[in-house]
Image: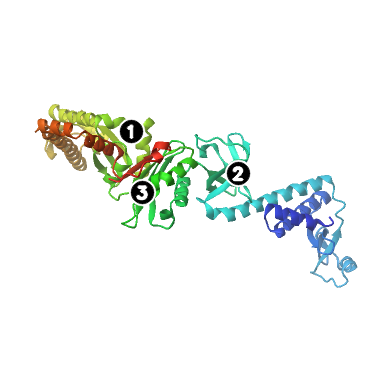
Amino acid sequence: MENIYQSIEILSKEKGIDPQIVLDAVKDAMLIAARKHFRTVENYEAEFDEKNGGLKLYAVKTVADPVADPALEMSPSEARRIDPNAEIGATVRIPKPTDALGRISAQTAKQVIFQKVREAERETIYREYADRVGELVNTTIKRVEGLDLVVDLGKTEARLPKREQSRLESYSVGDRVRCVIKIVDKSAKGPGVVVSRGDAELVKRLFEQEVPEIYDGTVTIRACAREAGERTKIAVSSRDRDVDSVGACVGMKGMRVQSIIRELRGEKIDIIEYSDDAVTFATRALSPAKITRVTILDPVEHHMEVIVDDSQLSLAIGKKGQNVRLAAKLLGWKIDIKSEEEKRQEVQNAMALLSTGAPVSALIEHGLAEATVDALVNGDIGTVEKLGNMTPEELEAIEGIDEEAVGRIQQAINSFYGQAYEQTAEQPEQQLEPQAENVEPAEAAAEASAAPSDTMEASSESVAGEGVEEYSGTESSAGEEAHRP
């Protein structure tokens, strides 16, 4: 036990924890080992000896007369042999030999020390990194554990799980990578810090480093949606009317965004100008697809319907639904995309239901209970039209229909006809456009043949979309100026 304090100081520096914590862990380990070795219920105390740098072990007993429990108490005469000033009620410490502790006790003490040190280390790491979640850090790949990677943060290790890696990237031991701190967990068995290369926060932090206008607050990142290794959509806005938010992020000849694309190993980035208007924002977010119209279905539940031309449907949906999925994540809205043909067919079906008579079961979608529908069917009421022509008295005569049910039926019928009329009202608007386009076909053909370059330019602008810049990391993209409508 001699000079144990030197070992404690070395261990404390290596783990970055307070030496007093390690010293307390050693004392607790010695007490556990002593109880296991002496096999008694005596109370023990461990004390650090500053003179020789060792630990001393004492059994603590209380002076009592008479003695009720010899393991915890001792008589005044026995106590005065150790301490002449001992009185009844005082405590006396009896020295115990530490050399008597055997190998098993020493092994137990070692396990206790390691456990206490690990707990203290996790607590220290948690305090240091808990407030740094989302921060960009430089790390080095230290080792590979299955599909996960263990990286070195300097003072501690962190884990880079497979799910937080980009599919475009491969790593080797010793590689330096930039990550964001995602989770700090002090209850984990392994490294308590989890870093990520696939989180959207990484793109935000990279833009903050590359774009001074974002760092000083002139340009703000309003939203970011990412599928690591595939594509990122980021929405920005400017607080200064004279500063172009999209152009600031792109940089001269795309230098700023190209630097971020290289860091992400060629991941495509769409830079979108933010708008408070959900319709305008959705139109930009779904770029490069050309949107015909956007309808807000439910502003409370954030549900919208987007109509595109038949030729633009696959472009709006994207590869495996990626474009619309990222747009929905960016907006925070549920987006239903339909082609003109699908919407037209939907309207025709609604009109057919109105002409032939819709079944009563169609009212279930408008809030009518199934039990009420069953009662109506049993009462020989099969269509919504027949139900709408009945008086409240006739409805209450049906078994299972009361006054409250009549009110719910009326609400469902009003909702059903209201939706049907809204859908049919959109049909004339769709039929007006081709008529307007064919008013003067000769003049349109003459203009098209006279200015082919203008037609090509307008076509390219319509594909790019308003307020949107798309970069894929190719050399041609790097040389293009930021397009501003």
Q: Secondary structure at mark 3?
A: helix
Q: Secondary structure at mark 1?
A: helix
Residue 368 is at least partly visible in this image: no
Residue plotted at (50% across, 37% down): 166
Residue 317: which disc? 1
Residue 140: which disc? 2
Relative side of 343 to 219, left or right: left
Q: Secondary structure at mark 2?
A: strand
Frontmost residue, 286 versus 439: 439
Q: What amino acid type should be assigned to the residue bearing mark 3? A: Gly
Query: Coloring scheme of the render?
Result: rainbow
Residue 350: which disc? none
Quick one: quadrant of the N terminus? bottom right
Dividing the picture into quarters, in which one does residue 296 lie? top left
Label 3, on which residue?
A: 247
The percent coordinates of residue 320 (x first, y second) are 38, 30
Mark-to-mark CA distance, 2 and 3:
34 Å
Q: Residue furthest right?
A: 81
